[in-house]
Every structure is written in C-alpha cells, then in structure tokens.
C-alpha cells in the first residue's frame, strides 16, 4: 500500500511538473514575441533611411587630443596619438612635434615604442617633403629616428617611402642617414 501511495504521489508530481513547464514555455514564448514587437517599435525611425555605408578609416578615428595641448618633448605619447587621429591632415607643426618625440630615452617606454613604430612609416610615406624640410632645418635625435626606421616591427612597404624622399631632391647628412636607414630596413624585409 505504501508503495502504491508513493507511485501515485510521484505520478502526480511529474504531471504537475510537466504542466508547469508547458505553462512556463508558453509564457516565455508570449513574452519573447511581445519583447520583439516592442523592440521593433522602439527601433523604428521616421523619415528617410539612414546611410549605412561604412565610414572611412579616418572618420572612425575619434579625435581625443587637441593640437594646442601638444609639446615637442621626448617620448610624447600624446603627439603620437594626435598623429594617429589626424594622419590624413597633418600640419608641418604637428609633424615637427611628432619627430621631436623620438628619443633614445623612449626605449624603455613600451607603449611609446609600439605605437610610434606603427606611425613613423605612415608619416614618412604620406609627408616626404615636409619630413625632408623639417630634417634639414631642425635638430632631432637622429639616432633614435634612424633606429626606428631601420628596425620595423611590422612589414611596411618601404620602397615607396624611399622614392618619395629621393624625389624631393634634397641631400644633406640627416636626409641621407634616413635614406640609409630605410635602405637597411628594406634589405632586411626583402631577405
């Protein structure tokens, strides 16, 4: 008798449990449908459809560093960030501050070294005339600049950078040392 009673109680519990599961499943389905309708209403926009084309790389870069906050000092990560954010429209003054940021002191600054290494080839490729003019008239840490140029961490395309600098027609010890560093990097990368 006890066994029969246990079996009946078990069956009753199982049947109640399955009904509860069915009811919960129905409630969940109804809630999900209501949520999707509410979400669709919330996301609906009146007016013409928005242009969903992919923004350009430069448009996606958020400008966080104003130019007037920059200073020409060694290991200036803000200068590197400014150049990154404004790579398509750098002024000669911005390039000057960028070049002044390179120093042998920066070797221990990992953040600066990695980020500056990415940017130096891009700046030299885009602004060869400005680079040559600045190198010719200003004093920079040429050892630090040439070290960066001859030891690329990434695989930049160096031949167009060399051609751009050569096309300026300027030859002086600083420009020639930059060209020599780029030639060494190119040889290293093409081995």
Image (tube, helix red, strand yellow):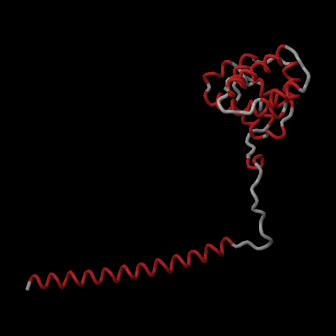
Instruction: Name which residue lies at 61% across and 76% down.
Output: 38
Q: Position of residue 9 (x, y in %)?
A: 19, 83
Q: Quadrant of the C terminus?
A: top right
Asked if residue 31 is positioned above or below residue 171 in the image, the reply reads below
Front residue of 190/45: it is 190
- Image side of residue 36 versus residue 177, left or right: left
Compared to 21, does 125 lie above or below? Answer: above
Residue at the extreme top? 173
State the quadrant of the N terminus. Answer: bottom left
Residue shown at 73%/46% (left/top)?
62
Which residue in the rendered view is the most extreme toward the right? Answer: 169
Q: Residue at x 83, y 13 (%)?
A: 173
187 and 12: which is toward the camera: 187
Between 78 and 26, the residue placed more toward the observer is 26
- Give how far across and how far down residue 89 sits, in percent: 84, 39
Residue drawn at point x = 82 percent, y = 30 percent: 95
Where does residue 145 sit, x and y in percent of width and height? Answer: 74, 21
How many marks do you count on the picture? 0
């Amino acid at each position: 008798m006890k066994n029969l009673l246990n079996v009946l109680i078990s069956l009753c519990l199982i049947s109640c449990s399955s009904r509860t599961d069915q009811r919960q499943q129905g409630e969940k389905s109804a809630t999900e449908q209501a949520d999707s309708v509410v979400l669709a209403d919330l996301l609906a926009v009146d007016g013409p459809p928005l242009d969903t084309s992919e923004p350009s790389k430069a448009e996606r870069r958020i400008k966080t560093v104003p130019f007037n906050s920059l200073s020409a000092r060694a290991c200036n990560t803000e200068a590197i960030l400014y150049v990154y954010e404004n790579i398509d429209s750098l002024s000669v003054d911005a390039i000057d501050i960028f070049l002044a940021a390179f120093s042998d002191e920066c070797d221990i600054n990992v953040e600066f070294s990695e980020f500056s290494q990415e940017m130096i080839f891009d700046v030299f490729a885009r602004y060869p005339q400005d680079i040559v003019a600045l190198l010719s008239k200003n004093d920079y840490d040429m050892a630090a600049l040439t070290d960066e140029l001859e030891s690329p961490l990434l695989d930049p395309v160096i031949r167009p950078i060399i051609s751009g600098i050569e096309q300026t027609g300027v030859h002086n010890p600083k420009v020639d040392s930059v060209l020599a560093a780029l030639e060494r990097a190119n040889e290293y990368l093409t081995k």
